[in-house]
Amino acid sequence: MSSSNIIKGTAFLRTRNGQTRSCAGSPVRLFPRGPSTIAFVRRAYGAETGGFARRTSWEPQPFDPVVTIETCDAQGGFAFDRLPDGDYYVAAVVSIESPAGDGGGYMVQEGGTIVTLVSVSGGAVKPIVLTR
């Protein structure tokens, strides 16, 4: 079992007006695929392989002790290294607040969390892009 795998990537969303926002400064979580994480991802994001949800906070989960957290850099990049062979979920928060467009000065939350399933083995460097 190799432990030299790397998952690296970027996460971004587009606002309603077409601007791009990255995960810069936000947490990215990595957690192994298993019965409890599969159930969580399916329930929260709509499919076992991941998805998108308009949540930008992370409620405590029973599997939190096995979660690894990195912070997106200024360009929206992140990396997890020295990973054993296996299947992992990567969850990135992209928080976007934009004007509601009604001239009332209200802000609308457009961001959320993007999750995807990634498999690594054999010392692979696996590049991913999280968006929707």
Image (cartoon, rainbow, N blue to C red):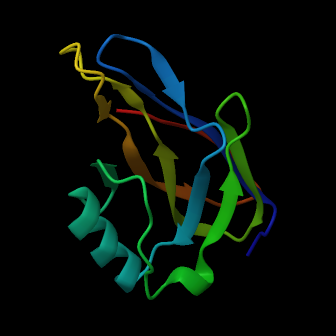
Viewer-side residue, 108 vs 48: 108
Q: Position of residue 43 (x, y in %)?
A: 22, 69
Residue 17 appears in which quarter of the rendering?
top left
Can the viewer see residue 60? yes
Can the viewer see residue 124? no
Q: Position of residue 56 (x, y in %)?
A: 41, 52
Quarter holding the C terminus is: top left
Residue 16 appears in which quarter of the rendering?
top left
Q: Position of residue 61 (x, y in %)?
A: 43, 81
Q: Residue at x 30, y 22 (%)?
A: 105
Q: Position of residue 10 (x, y in %)?
A: 60, 35
- The correct choice, above or below, for 75 with respect to 33 in the image is above
- The correct choice, above or below, for 20 with respect to 42 in the image is above
Quarter holding the N terminus is: bottom right
Viewer-side residue, 106 vs 108: 106
Figure disc tally? 0
Q: Residue at x 25, y 22 (%)?
A: 100
